Image: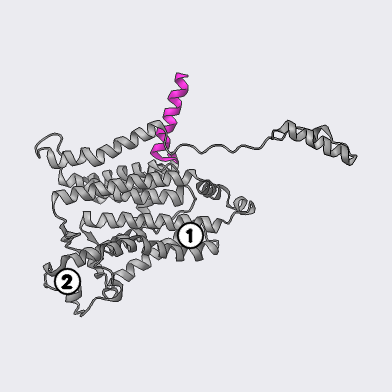
Amino acid sequence: MNTTTTSTIERSMAAEAGTEVSPAATLPVERARLPGRAPLLSGKGWAGFLVALIAICALAPLMNLVAAPGSLFHMSDYAVALVGKIMCYAIAALAMDLIWGYTGILSLGHGLFFALGGYMMGMYLMRQIGLEGNYKSELPDFMVFLDWKELPWHWTFSGSFIAQMILVVAVPGLLAFVFGYFAFRSRIKGVYFSIITQAMTFAAMLLFFRNETGFGGNNGFTDFKRILDIPIATQQMRMTLFVVTGLVLLGFFLFARWLVQSKFGRVLQAIRDAESRVMFSGYNPVTYKLTIWTISAMMCGVAGALYVPQVGIINPGEMSPPYSIEIAIWAAVGGRATLIGPIVGAFLVNGAKSWFTVAFPEYWLYFLGAIFICVTLWLPQGVVGLVRKLAGKNKGERA
């Protein structure tokens, strides 16, 4: 039934009732149309995504496994390990962008979630050593050294790959949920929240340093042999881990893109900009902040699980506060609230770190601090924001 027919019926009903209908009441009413959801990626975005996918799944394996070591196109095992490690860092930076860039919550404790995921993977890798350890025991070497007779209760599922992969996301997620539930309900925010997350990370680091916890003390886990009964120290396995890490990074990027473009993501950005107005509009900010906080922690757990077999070690040092601060720096340098920015920042900062720690190891921390200060003062939107600004100027000049 169209609006004209509706107006006619209204006039007839009013005439029978002996009342008059004002002209304004008979005007057709148009329903408000909400803007359609933007595509997940633009044409150029999908093209870049496809290039990255080909580089990870085809180009890198060919350069490492097929190209001759002396060739210009050869990708060394060192480069594979380095890029694989940085892609794990990029996942953590992407998780930081969701909680900081899009929700306005600066966390200085994401290194804890990263390390917990790494420890869950490390427990499985330690059980995979089997009788090949120094003490030829089913127990990990550090337990034999400490005269432990059996595995502690929290190692119950460490022999199962599937169970440990569930714990990789469940343990960081559960800790984040419990911590966030009390913190957000208490309306702790701003610098106070950042300090508390840093304190939580520091406390966990001190706990894991203790031998009684059953996590290897200050030495942590190392000397891994196999994963899924396949030797780790082979070129093929290293490349497999590289490809899996790249695919997980691309998958998380698409997931984050979908998330921030949804209604849920728009509410998160509204909380970032004006939380009190969101609350007065009928939304509960606690639910949204707790959800994205937990998702972000689980992403960091996956990044840590992929990191450990490629680096070959996990210890409490990964929980130290400077590591969590570095994650925030990667997001800031690349550009917050851009998704691609934290990935770029992770590659830029860690690429510079790899060179600086060799050429000028004593000056690296000064250089890192200088980068953060410069970005804060002159590049608040990071490298990606600067590139977009310059591209916009060039388009304006051409027009």
The mark nearer the N terminus, 1 or 2, is 2
Q: Residue at position x 24%, y 70% from top? A: 216
Circle 1/circle 2 CB separation < 8 Å: no
Note whether 353 is above or below 388 in the view shown: below
Neighbour tally class for label 2: few under 14, some 14-19, many 20 plus, Cα within 10 Å: many
The secondary structure that dominates the magenta segment is helix
Q: Secondary structure at mark 1?
A: helix
Q: Which residue is mark 1?
A: 193
Specify the quadrant that holds the N terminus: top right
Residue 307 colored magenta? no
Residue 384 colored magenta? yes
Q: As shown in the figure, which amino acid type bears the numbered disc 2? A: Asp
Indicate which disc residue 141 carries: 2
x then y, percent, for residue 304? 30, 57
Note whether 215 is above or below 254 in the view shown: below
x then y, percent, for residue 73? 15, 35
x then y, percent, for residue 88? 30, 50
Indicate which disc residue 323 carries: none
Give the residues drawn in magenta, as a range.
378-399
User: Which tag is nearer the camera, tag 1 or tag 2?
Assistant: 2
Residue 75 visible in the current orientation: no
- Residue 9 versus residue 353: which sits nearer the camera? 9
Residue 378 visible in the current orientation: yes
